[in-house]
Image (tube, rainbow, N blue to C red):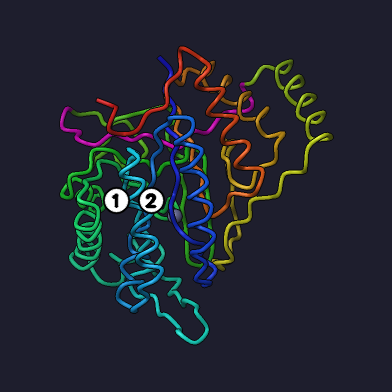
């Protein structure tokens, strides 16, 4: 059985704008499509944002977002923990309706460096507690904000274990980003569909011992060099043809959180973010190729905030395609044992 996890990071952009309306609107439509097609999704909730909405007295967005999260739960979707530490000390400007972030507080490791492990761990745990109280739901999987994890983070792995997490899903094999404030390097990661890790191995290597309690389910990346030339050409021609007939894909740009990126490498992956209709060809092509490359478990990452009009079409077409295949199933982290 081939398994697909459709994961969404539920959050707003890092551009300082408090644009939760687009998040609510796009998520509403995603939930509608999921409901009509009877599929279960996974939402990694950026709960620290919600905590800050509450502590800055923004009742309306707080209530709207909370209700949407509760609807996800009622609809049977999985709620998982997504943690962006830059919210912890974010400053809200009421008159401009904007947020100011401290860019040196981007990753969990930044918080450890600045405030010590005890404080970093306390923030992580407090925010997760807020999530459990709000939703009456416990996560079993974690995704780091901005995928900001690095190889050896004993403290971080311990924090995850202490909070009862069994899965991490923050690794994107081959990804690398270097900037003024960030240094995220997953290029040394193994590229498997799933692996056990521990504090000695770090996130990126298979645990050698029997003591591993954590499992990594990385975000799917595909080695495009391993794709058969003929298949590449056929997919490319079909894509171009479709692309010619359908609207053009918009480049996914993310927010404008200026890290002064000097070096970046995003490996071949698939996502519904900023898609055009023709991307259905790419999604099917990469799904098949990933299976050929030995992956029976595929974790796809998307963001409701980055859905374009065409993304909804693509999302529905893709889940219909997966559902039409008897050997495929759409699952969550709670289905894995
Ligand atoms: Zn995020």
| Nearer the observer, 157 or 324 | 324
Q: Are marks 2 and 1 in contact (CB under 8 Å)?
A: yes
Q: At which x and y percent is residue 299?
A: 44, 33
The vertical placement of 131 against 7, above or below, is below
The segment highlighted magenta reads 210-226
Is 158 within the magenta? Answer: no
On screen, residue 37 above or below 145: above
The residue that appears at 63% across and 51% down in the rendered structure is 252
Specify whether residue 214 is painted magenta: yes
Disc 2 to disc 1, how far (Cα)? 8 Å
Q: Which quadrant holds the C terminus?
A: top left
How many C-alpha atoms fall within 10 Å of the one at disc 2: few (<14), some, or many (≥20)?
Answer: many
Please state the horizontal and vertical placement of residue 86, each as a whole percent of the image. Answer: 39, 68
Q: Which type of secondary structure does the marked residue at label 2 adopt?
A: loop
Residue wearing tag 2: 149
Q: Residue furthest bottom?
A: 95
Q: Main secondary structure of the magenta part?
A: loop
**Disc 1 residue crowd, few under 14, some 14–19, many 20+, Cα 10 Å:** some
Whether 128 is drawn above or below 60: the answer is: above
**Residue 233 coordinates in the image, percent (x, y):** 76, 21
User: In screen coordinates, is 213 left or right of 21?
Assistant: left
Q: Quadrant of the N terminus?
A: top left
Residue 77 lies in quadrant: top left
In the foreground, 18 or 176: 18
For marks 2 and 1, give the one nearer the viewer. Answer: 2
In the figure, is residue 115 to the left or right of 184?
left
Q: Which residue in the protein does label 1 denote? A: 153
Q: Is residue 187 left or right of residue 217?
A: right
For label 1, the SS is loop
Q: Residue drawn at (59%, 49%), measured in percent from left and top?
A: 307
Q: Quadrant of ligand 1?
A: bottom left
Residue found at x 21% / y 68%: 119
């Amino acid at each position: 059985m081939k398994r697909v996890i459709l994961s969404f990071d539920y959050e707003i952009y890092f551009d300082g704008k408090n644009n939760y309306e687009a998040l609510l609107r796009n998520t509403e439509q995603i939930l509608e499509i999921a409901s009509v097609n009877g599929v279960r999704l996974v939402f990694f909730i950026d709960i620290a944002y919600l905590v800050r909405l509450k502590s800055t007295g923004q009742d309306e967005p707080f209530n709207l977002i909370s209700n949407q999260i509760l609807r996800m739960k009622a609809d049977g979707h999985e709620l998982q923990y997504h943690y962006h530490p830059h919210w912890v000390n974010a400053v809200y400007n009421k008159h401009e309706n904007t947020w100011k972030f401290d860019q040196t507080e981007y990753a969990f490791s930044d918080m450890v460096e600045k405030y010590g492990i005890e404080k970093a761990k306390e923030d992580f745990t407090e925010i997760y507690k807020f999530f459990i109280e709000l939703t009456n739901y416990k996560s079993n999987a974690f995704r780091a904000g901005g995928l900001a994890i690095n190889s050896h983070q004993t403290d971080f792995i311990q924090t995850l274990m202490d909070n009862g997490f069994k899965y991490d899903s923050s690794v994107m094999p081959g990804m690398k980003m270097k900037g003024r404030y960030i240094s995220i390097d997953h290029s040394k990661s193994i590229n498997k569909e799933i692996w056990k890790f521990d504090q000695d191995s770090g996130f990126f290597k298979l645990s050698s011992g029997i003591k591993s309690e954590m499992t990594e389910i990385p975000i799917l990346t595909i080695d495009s060099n391993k794709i058969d030339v003929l298949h590449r050409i056929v997919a490319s021609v079909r894509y171009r043809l479709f692309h010619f007939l359908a609207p053009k894909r918009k480049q996914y740009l993310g927010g404008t959180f200026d890290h002064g990126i000097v070096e970046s490498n995003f490996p071949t992956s698939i996502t519904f973010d900023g898609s055009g209709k023709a991307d259905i060809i790419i999604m099917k092509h990469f799904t098949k190729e990933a299976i050929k490359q030995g992956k029976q478990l595929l974790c796809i990452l998307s963001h409701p905030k980055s859905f374009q009009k065409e993304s909804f079409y693509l999302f529905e077409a893709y889940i219909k395609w997966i559902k039409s295949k008897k050997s495929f199933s759409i699952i969550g982290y709670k289905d894995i044992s």
